[in-house]
Image: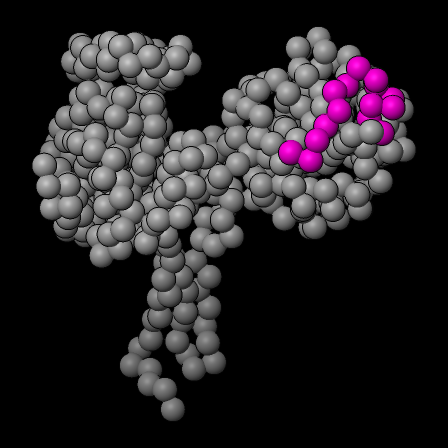
């Protein structure tokens, strides 16, 4: 296969389809989503057979149990995909909404209208259910999309693509509105991220290596985050019971997520009282603690932390712990080591809470809440395409609105500028 020619064809078709999707009505796009849900329900046997091929090849290639689990399309996971499509169809449509209308002294009215981005390329690994999640959000927000899943899920993704095609046809939308790349050749990724004439934005969902490569080589804007080095700071004005509950949840609710706490900061004024309680709670959960010298002076069983620990995204039952000199010390540490994903303060002091949310430069900043809430569903977005730590356009969990832009609209009645 001539990969460059193939990808150029995909891009050209996506650009044409984007126009049709953008001008379609909410009802048409919702019909495509609901028809896709029906197609998935009717194709359970085909989906299971295709997924079985991927699982068999994965075992032959030595994929570990965690990867195989992510790859598997169980009946409940198919149910979740179907329900997800119905939920996205029920979400408010952001396209065409006009806001901030004001009269100018000249008599014209000026406002902003929300519009699709155009063509969105999404690159992801392992989980075939991402194919449905990504396609549904892009379609609902009036965009065409090009999906490139991992080679390990090629058969599953193609079976899902067939259901998406049936749903689009049922609604009268071009099949190219959602295209799933049919080749496992990695060169396809290189082409996708260097086609600004066809692709408006790239969203990578995967490991740090994938995202670093795309960020480095892309000629198309990228919505991404590299790491989730999230912090919880326990202030001297914290409620001890509340602090313990939030810190344990932020670390142990799930270990392998980007919004899991990786560093715990404790104010020196309460460290003698709080650290033994925290150490005991984490020991019960099997979490290894790596601490600074002041932490180890209070809890000697803690392993000595190195400089690398303050920058680490463990994604494992390991936690870095540091005693800091009050709010100033916490903010300084976070702004030095945070990946600007999610950081939280535990305090009953309103003034300190306000300083924290003002001065900590992260995409989500919280007060008295677990970092695990940094999620599109929990934020009321319905669903998310991913998390962005960029500072332009979309930041934090990216839902439907994050897949759109705005343009100015002006209303006049024969007005001319003098």
Instruction: Compare residues 123 and 190 and report the one nearer the observer.
Output: 190
Instruction: Compare residues 362 and 204 and report the one nearer the observer.
Output: 204
Rendered residue at 78%/30% (across/down): 292
x%, y% of residue 209?
42, 35
Q: Is residue 305 magenta?
A: yes
Q: Is residue 101 left or right of residue 170?
A: right
The C terminus sits in image quarter: bottom left
x%, y% of residue 404?
36, 50
Note whether residue 298 is visible. Answer: yes
Asked which quadrant contains residue 75, the reply is top left
Which segment did they paint magenta? 294-308
Instruction: Compare residues 19 and 392 and report the one nearer the observer.
Output: 392
Q: Is residue 79 left or right of residue 343?
A: left
- Vertical side of 265 occupied by 392: above or below: below
The N terminus sits in image quarter: top left
x%, y% of residue 378?
52, 30
In the image, farthest residue toward the bottom: 418
Note whether residue 51 is visible. Answer: no
Rendered residue at 33%/12% (across/down): 62
Q: How many tags in the picture?
A: 0
Rendered residue at 71%/15% (across/down): 282
- Vertical side of 374 occupied by 242: above or below: above
Asked which quadrant contains residue 283, the reply is top right
- Vertical side of 204 occupied by 291: above or below: above
Q: Is residue 129 left or right of residue 269?
A: left
Rendered residue at 57%/20% (across/down): 316
């Amino acid at each position: 296969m001539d990969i460059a020619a193939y990808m150029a064809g995909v891009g050209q078709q996506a650009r044409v389809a984007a126009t049709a999707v953008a001008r379609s009505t909410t009802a048409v796009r919702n019909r495509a989503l609901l028809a896709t849900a029906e197609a998935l329900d009717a194709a359970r046997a085909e989906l299971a057979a295709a997924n079985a091929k991927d699982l068999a090849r994965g075992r032959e290639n030595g994929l570990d149990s965690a990867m195989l689990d992510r790859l598997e399309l169980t009946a409940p996971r198919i149910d979740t995909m179907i329900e997800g499509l119905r939920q996205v169809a029920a979400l408010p449509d952001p396209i065409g909404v006009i806001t901030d209308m004001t009269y100018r002294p000249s008599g014209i009215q000026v406002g902003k209208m929300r519009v699709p981005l155009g063509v969105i390329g999404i690159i992801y690994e392992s989980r075939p259910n991402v194919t449905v999640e990504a396609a549904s959000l892009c379609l609902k927000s009036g965009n065409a999309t090009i999906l490139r899943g991992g080679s390990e899920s090629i058969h599953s993704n193609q079976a899902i693509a067939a259901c998406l095609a049936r749903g689009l046809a049922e609604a009268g939308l071009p099949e190219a509105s959602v295209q799933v790349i049919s080749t496992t050749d990695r060169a396809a990724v290189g082409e996708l991220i260097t086609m600004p004439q066809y692709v408006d934005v790239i969203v990578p969902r995967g490991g740090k290596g994938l995202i670093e490569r795309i960020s480095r080589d892309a000629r198309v804007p990228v919505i991404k985050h590299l790491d989730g080095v999230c912090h919880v700071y326990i202030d001297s004005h914290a409620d001890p019971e509340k602090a313990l509950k939030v810190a344990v949840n932020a670390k142990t609710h799930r270990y392998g997520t980007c919004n899991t706490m990786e560093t715990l900061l404790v104010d020196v004024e309460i460290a003698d009282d709080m650290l033994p309680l925290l150490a005991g709670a984490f020991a019960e959960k099997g979490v290894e603690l790596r601490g600074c010298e002041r932490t180890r002076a209070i809890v000697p069983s803690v392993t000595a932390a190195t400089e690398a620990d303050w920058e680490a995204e463990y994604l494992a039952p390991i936690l870095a712990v540091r005693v800091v000199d009050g709010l100033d010390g916490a903010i300084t540490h976070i702004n030095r080591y945070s990946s600007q994903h999610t950081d939280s303060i535990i305090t009953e002091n309103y003034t300190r809470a306000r300083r924290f949310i003002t001065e900590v430069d992260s995409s989500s900043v919280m007060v008295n809440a677990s970092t695990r809430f940094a999620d599109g569903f929990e934020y009321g977005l319905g669903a998310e395409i991913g998390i962005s730590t960029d500072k332009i356009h979309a930041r934090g969990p990216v839902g439907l609105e994050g897949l759109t832009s705005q343009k100015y609209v002006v209303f006049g009645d024969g007005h001319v500028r003098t």
